Amino acid sequence: MIRIATWDLETSGLEGDVGRLLCGSILDHQTGEMTSYRNDKLKGAKRKNMADDLALAVAIRNKLEHYHITVGWFSKGFDIPFLNTRLVKGGERMLAPHMHLDPIWFCKGWRGIKPRSAKMAVMAEFFNLPERKPGVDVDVWIDAALGGDSAAMDILVDRCESDVRITAQLAAKILDAGLIKNIQIYP
C-alpha cells in the first residue's frame, strides 16, 4: 500500500535561522489519522525552553519519513527548507529526499492555472472548498511563540490541522483538473 501524507508547519517567523517551529500536523491518507506535534507538549522532549525546537523538528522529520509521498502547500518554498534549517542548526540530518507534491506551483500560471493569487486562502475560495483558511490574531502568535501559552498553541494547532485538510482538498482538485503531470523527488 502506498503511504501518502499531507502536512504543514506553524512557526514563529519566516526565516529558519531565527524563527522556531511551534507545531506541525501530518494527515495520513491511508488511515485518515491526523497527528499534531506541538513544542509546548512534546512527549519525552528534554528542552531548555520554547526556543529549543530540535526535538519537535526531529519528531516531524521522523514521521514524514514513514511515507512514500508527502504533500504540502508552498512546502518546497517554506516548510521543507524551514524544517531542514532547524534540523541542521541543531546538528541533526535533514529530511531524506522523497517523492513530494507541492500543488501551489500549478496555480501560478506558467504550469497550469492563474487565479489572482496562489495563496491557500484564495485557492480554497477559487475551488469553493467547504473549509477556509482560518485567520489568527497577532497576539496569539506572540503568546504561543514567546511563552508557549497553551490556549494560543491550541489555536495554532487548529489552524495547522485546517491547513493540512485544505491542502489535501486542493491537491485533489488540482489532480482532478489534470494540472499535475509528475511528482518529483525533493529536497
Image (cartoon, rainbow, N blue to C red):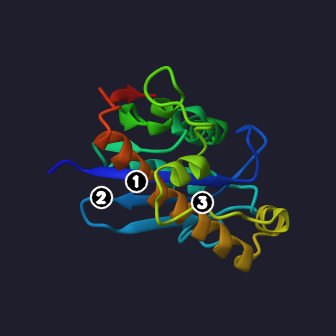
Residue indicated by mark 3: 133
> For residue 26, which quarter of the picture?
bottom left
Mark 3 element type: loop
Earlier residue among tags 3 and 2: 2
Please provide percent x and percent y for residue 166: 48, 57
Earlier residue among tags 2 and 1: 2
Residue indicated by mark 1: 168
Neighbours of disc 1 within 10 Å: few (<14), some (14-19), many (20+): many
Query: For the residues carrying marks 3 and 2, which lies nearer the camera in this image?
Result: 3
Q: Is residue 49 left or right of residue 183?
A: right
Check residue 29 in the rendering and tell me which mark sits there, or answer none.
2
Residue 65 visible in the shown view: no
Neighbours of disc 2 within 10 Å: few (<14), some (14-19), many (20+): some
Please provide percent x and percent y for residue 138: 83, 62
Q: CA distance from mark 3 to mark 1?
A: 13 Å
Residue 102 to residue 168: above or below = above
Query: For the residues carrying marks 2 and 1, which lies nearer the camera in this image?
Result: 1
Residue 103 visible in the shown view: yes
Earlier residue among tags 3 and 1: 3
Question: What's under tag 3, amino acid-wise?
Answer: Lys
Give 4 or 18, whichever is nearer the viewer.
Answer: 4
Residue at x 37% of width, y 41% of height: 174
Asked whether disc 2 touches disc 1, contact meaning CB atoms under 8 Å apart, the reply is: yes
> For residue 78, which quarter of the picture?
top right
